Image (cartoon, rainbow, N blue to C red):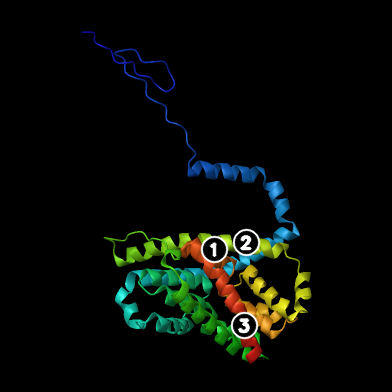
Amino acid sequence: MAITKPAPERTDDGPPAKPGEPAEPREEGRHLNSPLLLTILMLVLVLLQGPIRGALAAPVMQSWTTVFVAVMVQALPFLVLGVLLSAAIAVFVPPSFFARALPSRPSLAVPVAGAAGAVLPGCECASVPVAGALVRRGVTPAAALTFLLSAPAINPIVLTATAVAFPGNPEMVLARLVASLLVACAMGWLWLRLGRTDWLKPPSRPSHDGQSRGEAFWGSVRHDVMHAGGFLVVGAMAAATLKAVVPEAWLSTAADNPVLSVLALAVLAVVLSICSEADAFVAASLSQFSLTARLAFLVVGPMIDLKLFAMQAGTFGRSFALRFAPATFALAVVVSVLTGWVML
């Protein structure tokens, strides 16, 4: 019987190995790693520092940089506050607490959550991670979303800033409180009726099994800072880009039309992405617009802007943000007009 000899081994880069000789080791492919990519990027920046410096000196880029830094400086402290609260809720607060604190009926939990937003001294960047933590802890999504919308608009710091910015119009404080709370509760009830579970996808969290509470807390903080912080940067970059290219003369033209003025300031609130603790002073400076138009600016901004949309998409999923953001914007504009007509 003929015996078939095994085929000689082959290497990737050389001829077949002879029988009885060990095969040559394969050469590992060279791959780019993070340190190498960072080194290449730094070398490119050094080589192109002249053109980069010239581009940054342009007026448009200076405006872009100013807006980007302003948004980040305003938002980052409150994002950190929200992350700390989110981690504290996730690690230290037992799930049974929320079942006791909120009414069992979701329709009643919505206004309670809206009123609870008045006690959080933070802006919209803080409310997004906190709302995500509430959903993960078993709170009905309608109540968590109501809290997300109300907290940055009706907390004591924001209302005090509004009173300081409009010393001659104290009715603006009450109008902002009423309109913002109505929009937040209406969106919560709307979610109860039309919302679907598959639209809302909070991000999974790393497991902290076997860790102490302190380790789990800081692990949760690091996770949320990396997750929400990246979307905050994207939103701030988008806001700065749009602010740098929109002509200011458009605002003066829009102020002469009552309908267009409301829509213009509502869109401007989305584009500028100003922290709710500072937006009242910007609204007060837009004196060419009516009080109703400026109320729309104050109601829309804390509920939906570019950085908020990016953070909501990152926290709850893009499918959620694409539905929730337009509905919130439309309802906020309508409620602002009605509230302004009655109270202003």
Residue 313 placement (x, y as % from top left): 51, 63
Q: Is residue 185 above or below residue 15?
A: below
Front: mark 2 or 3: 3
Is residue 283 or residue 185 the one in the foreground? Answer: 185
Q: Is residue 16 above or below residue 157?
A: above
Residue 107 placement (x, y as % from top left): 41, 82
Q: Is residue 81 left or right of residue 274?
A: left
Distance in Å between CA atoms under marks 1 and 2:
10 Å
Counting residues from the start of the chain, the first of labels 1 and 2 encountered is 2
Is residue 333 or residue 113 the one in the foreground? Answer: 333
Is residue 292 or residue 157 the one in the foreground? Answer: 292
Tell me the number on the disc at residue 336: 3
**Residue of label 1:** 310
| Disc 3 packing (10 Å; few <14; some 14–19; many ≥20) | many
Distance in Å between CA atoms under marks 2 and 3:
26 Å
Picture residue at 31% right of the left edge, 12% below the top:
19
Secondary element type, mark 2: helix
**Residue of label 2:** 238
Residue type at the position of mark 2: Ala
Q: Is residue 176 above or below residue 88?
A: below
Quadrant of the rendered image containing residue 41: top right
Residue type at the position of mark 1: Ala
Counting residues from the start of the chain, the first of labels 1 and 3 encountered is 1
